[in-house]
Amino acid sequence: MAKEERINTCPETPSGRGAATAGSMLWLSVLSLIAFFLFWYVIVQFGFISRTLLASPEDVIRTFWFKLSHRAPDGATLGQNFKASLLLALTGYISAVVIGVPLGLLMGWYKKLDEMVRPLFELIRPIPPIAWIPLAILWFGIGLAAKAYIIWLSAFVPSVINSYFGIKLTDPVLINCVRTFGAGKWESFLKVGVPAALPMVFTGLRLSLSSAWMTLVAAELLASTEGLGYMIQMGRTLARPDIIIVGMLTIGFTGAAMAFGLEKLESKITPWRKQ
Amino acid sequence: MSAIAPPSFIRQFQIIPLVSVAAVGIAWQLLALSGYFGMALPSPVDVIRQFLQMIQEPISGVSLLGHIWASMFRVLSAFFIAVIIGIPLGLFMGWNKKVEAIVKPIFEIFRPIPPIAWIPLAILWFGIDEAPKIYICFIGAFVPVVMNAYTGIRFTDPLLLDAARMLGASKKQQFLEVAVPAALPAVFAGLQNGISLSWMCVLAAEMVGATKGVGYLILAGMNMDNPSMIICGMLIIGAVGAAIAAGLRLAERKILPWKREIAQ
């Protein structure tokens, strides 16, 4: 019994003593969080750190409620900023995925296409999407188009790369097997290559999403009049750390929620993949 | 487990890639010459001319190499700090349940916040000197470094640990001589992700406020309405980023000769 339990918990930590300590570990986590927030509260409340530099957790919560219904000081409520950012990020992300994934899959499958597109891709790939911001602003102005273009680019690269490698790593035995059974090139692509690549495709989708979300913040910091990035930038200009922290937490939480949604979708679509 | 191979279309000389790059280059040149996009699209020749000029003349009082070094210095010092703090933290978090229970919840609050979202707060805290930029790059590198060290330790093959224990290894030996070497490939993958994220963050930080560095360079190109300067800057950024990644891969091959590829 003890042996079995140890095998189960071993990959997590060899020093664990199984379920007996799980409860105390939870307590430790709760205590650590309480200590963290208390520390944060105390250093601000008792003036160890100036309020113009850091807002206390209490202020952050108050500002959060306030921003839900008030436009001050940056000109839009939290909901409006949130909607603007989310809309922009999803537009760029979805259009990148719709083009990027098929391109990556086809590149990995057809050698001719690979040889044509790959070198161009390798030239563009090392340039971080953020480095495109000045050029995009010069080309498209500081409107929606520039930001959408940069976000599209940031999501496009990881979705292509992962789909490409995903299908390249298809077990050749599987391909040979369906060939033997008379499947054509296109059919074996659709019925073997694509499903085999799906886990990697999803890795790509996850990376694209976090990359798109991060690039969105950068784009909004530099050129925007609305959105969460703009809100935190205004918070800096006005020396309002509470607004910055509300914005940061909203950004972080939204990113985590979207990643979680994608994970759920993945386990729906590829149920054969464990974990 | 054979994973992402190093980007190398140079590995064998092929005709099709060359033709496709040349075709795009020529199309770009013709498009620029047609004048349809006007000033906004410089030709490849313009970009090369701009590059030669940038090598000779300093931009805003700093030479091209000076700008590159300014950015490199920020990234490397941030990366160094992130490695010194992040790897031990990640390793202990993966090894010891107590450390994990204490650190993980706090870490999980900060993890989903993109490093770039720290820029306003960093500027508020540290002004617009070197410190905020190094801080942003540090955050960028820190999260992947910690996460990979953490998962690397956790996925140590339990069989290896059991074997070591059976042969009488102490806790310390199990950690240092079994778990840590087993986690090293994952740690290196984390370093790789960390430094490339850090390189991206330095650009964003420099674009928000700096007087030198490659991020400043492309922003200056935008402000001067000089797209060939921006494109030059972008190509330099890409090249330096690729060189840093290649350097790290080389270091990995030296340090981990038994692991020829990064799995992930």
Image (tube, coloured by chain):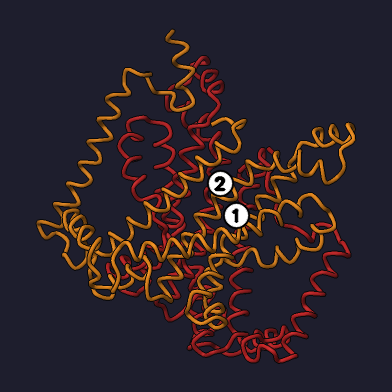
Chain colours: A orange, B red
Q: Residue at x 82, y 75 (%)?
A: B23
Which residue is found at the position 16% from the left and 52% from the top?
A41
Residue located farthest toward the top when viewing the structure as drawn: A1
Residue B93 drawn at (x, y percent): 39, 37
**Label 1: how many Cα within 10 Å (few below 14, some 14–19, many 20+):** some
A248, above or below A134, in the image: above
Amino acid under label 2?
A: Phe
Q: Is residue A252 above or below residue A167?
A: below
The chain containing the residue under callout 1 comes to B
Across and down, in percent, residue B71 comes to 49, 71
- The quarter in which the N terminus of chain B is drawn is top right
**Which residue is the site of mark 1?**
B248
Identify the mark nearer the N-term, 1 or 2. 2
Mark 1 residue type: Leu
**Alpha carbon separation for disc pair 1 and 2:** 8 Å
Question: What is the quadrant of residue A224 in the picture?
Answer: bottom left
Evaluate if marks 1 and 2 touch, with contact meaning CB atoms under 8 Å apart: yes
Chain to which the residue tagged by mark 2 belongs: B
Q: Nearer the viewer, residue B158 or B44?
A: B44
Position of A34 relative to A82 (above/below): above
| Vertical relation: B230 (above or below) B180 | below
Residue A243 image position (x, y, % from top left) = 25, 64
The residue to which callout 2 is attached is B188
Is A247 left, or right, of A218 in this rendering?
A: left
The residue depicted at 73 percent of the width and 86 percent of the height is B45
Report the disc number at residue B221: none
